[in-house]
Image: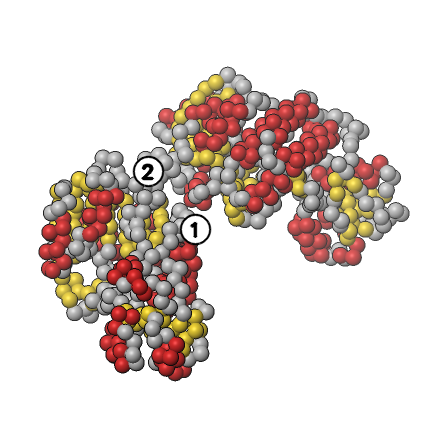
Amino acid sequence: MQYKENIGILNRFVVKLQDVESEKLFDARFSYFVQRDKDAFYAQLDEILMMRKQPLTCGWLEQYYNRNPQNREKRIVIFGAGEMGRLSCRTLLLANRIIDCICDNNQKMDGLEYQGIPIRNAAYVYQHFRDDLVIIAVSVKYQIEIYHQLIAAGFQETNILMSAYGGGGIYSDIPGQYFDTTIVTPDQNGEYFVDAGCFNGDTSLDCKKWCAGNLKMVYAFEPDRRNYQVCQKNLSGLGCEFELYEAGVWSDQTVIRFQEDAGPRWGSCVSDAGEVSITADSIDHKLNGRKATYIKMDVEGSELEALKGSIRTIQKYRPKLAISVYHKPEDIFEIPIFLEKLDLGYKYYLRHYQTRMEETVFICSAGNYGGDMKLSIVVPVYNTKACLKNCLQSIMEQTWRDMEIIIVDDGSTDGSSEICQMFAQKDDRVIYIKQNNKGSFNARRTGVERASGEFLMFVDSDDWIEKEMAEFLILRIKGADMVTSGVYYEARPGVVTLYLDQYEEGEYQDEGRQFLLKSMLYDIDTDTMQRLTPWIWNKLYRTKLAKQVYEQLETNNAFADDGVFLYSYLIYCGAVKVFHQCFYHYQYRENSIFHGKNSHMLTDINKAYLALLPCFEKHMLKEHLIQQLQRWITITTVMAINGGMGFSQQIQIPEFMLDTDGLKGKRVVLYGAGKVGKDYYRQLKKMGYNVVLWVDSNETEDENVKRPQEILHTEHDIILIAVSRPEYVESIQKSLRDLGVSEEKTLWKQPVRVL
């Protein structure tokens, strides 16, 4: 299998990895597959192991010290600067042991260092470390030779250690393999354990301890005759039923060959050139439909074939999986791709359980089947018949299937109710709620109260979402409490703008979250309103926290009701993740509350202020939050007077300071008919400046605004660009160059708010 042919599936797997340790380990393993650089792999592995809370131990060395306590204070010399020597050094350093010197017979190594440890020749070690501890860490065929070399040089036999590990180096086993309680939890109804590659039965014994004795059945596979006999004896003491098969595991009944040493310390591995033949069978055939709650596989490189022979069992029972992915470098992507294609909703983890290259385990625990990853989507509906089918259909077609769609009909009178009921009859995931008209805030509150999923989204009934939106957000939330994405925003018919959070993509927690809270409503440093998109519907929330927020809110107004929830949620939530991909399509609707005139807007703004003030006042960043809130309220009040309340055009408050330097006596073309452009136009006309033309590339309802091409037919001296975002300026300047207009005639300065 080539990973490039399945890059989309592999990317989907990577974003489902549940924690940083898993992500880093995948990077290390995949980099090794590409580069085959062991030293680079070990450097990444050491960083991962140091993230672990529990300290590493070296059991083999501890056993030596228990037998020879008088040697605990002796200095340590590692004999061997090759791969086994470096492995031994890494292990001891990770276990917080001090290594005083590395010795090697290769004179070219003398005077070099490894991780700050000096490498010296044998003569130097004979002179300076004769009474200290020497650990021989070389390949097996040289161990005895070096042992006699040290004895001949006068070293005491009790001060010379040779690793019991056949490879010639020392390493540390890390506890918790297969049964990390932070990842996998026992089934309350008992475990049915498949031990594929059971060796001597020790993993089945560990399983019994992990599930507190609630082990119902063990199916064990072991092809080696000697190991099989030991395993039979050990399993007999389990106190539960077991079936032990003298066979390997494969996709079907067959004979397979494998090598007992498949190269540079990857362990045994299946190979057509192998010298050992064994019989093998599939898990599906042996279990024949019987229950499995946990499948562990360490089967010498035949894991992928073994999984193929387990599909029926896995699909029927969706057991926990612990699959070795170290026997072959390509296992790190082939096995995840295979399981991701099954689309069984697993949560993915990677863990490594030794300081050497072996023992990387791919763990699959229960995912979104059974409700713990269920999504609730709340859709408030009020008289949106024309758009409603498109909206609901876009939700039904989401690639994330485990969800409920809660439609709250807020007293519709235009036929929307019939459409809602039709969708509820067609799809059993739809929950239809009818209530008297109480406004969008209370409609959303009703939906949230009914929600049973772990995660929560909102979709307005006159908008629609792309089919990947829910899956994208859910797969990225992981340990965060909110994920936000971009919006396709139709400001007026046919005019769509991409709105993104004005923060870099990434996770904002601890200091990052404080930075976000200090600037989300209004960033004083950059004079930016609402750096975080102020809408409720382009984000994913945790339902439990959203319920708590709604319980505390006592507001219902047509203006900023979603913002009141959003900013309250941000006060109480933990980490926030920001992504710039756009999935939500906000559609302009002329008769919507937001675009219509609202004579109660000042009252509603005050309600929003009074709703947010209490939770802001209780927060440790209250000075920053209240200052933002006051600026936001002030600016939105000006916006209300200038347009939202329907006041006369003669009654306007300037929002932006107009720098008129260089405009006096000039024929001015004003480019831009948005918020800044309208404000500049009013000020220029009021102050008597000669505005010969007002243009915008987008169509507007204002008959004074013309198309940019009119510039070519109008005598002018200067083109004043009236937009706030630098990226818009670049686009406008390019369009003017394309028209043949000299850039020397253009003028743009960053607009500054009056308030």
For label 1, the crowd category at 10 Å Cα-Cα, with few meaning under 14, some 14 to 19 and many 20 or more, is few
Residue 489 vs residue 239: left or right? right
Residue 20, numbered label:
1
> Closest to the observer: 478 or 459?
478
Residue 211 screen position, x and y as percent: 24, 41
Asked where in the image residue 619 lies, by quadrant, the reply is top right
Residue 441 position (above or below residue 352): above
Residue 64, numbered label:
none
Is residue 38 visible in the rendered image? The answer is: no
Amino acid type assigned to the residue bearing label 2 in the image: Tyr
Is residue 340 visible in the rendered image? The answer is: yes
The residue at 37%/51% (across/down) is 54
**Disc 1 vs disc 2: which is toward the camera?**
1
The residue at 85%/43% (across/down) is 690
Residue 493 position (above or below residue 410): below
The residue at 50%/24% (across/down) is 551
Measured in 3D between alpha carbons, the distance from the residue under mark 1 to the one under mark 2, in whole angstroms, is 23 Å
Residue 369, numbered label:
2
Residue 178 vs residue 218: left or right? right
Q: Secondary structure at mark 1?
A: helix
Residue 47 screen position, x and y as percent: 43, 58
Residue 417 vs residue 164: left or right? right
> Closest to the observer: 457 or 625?
625
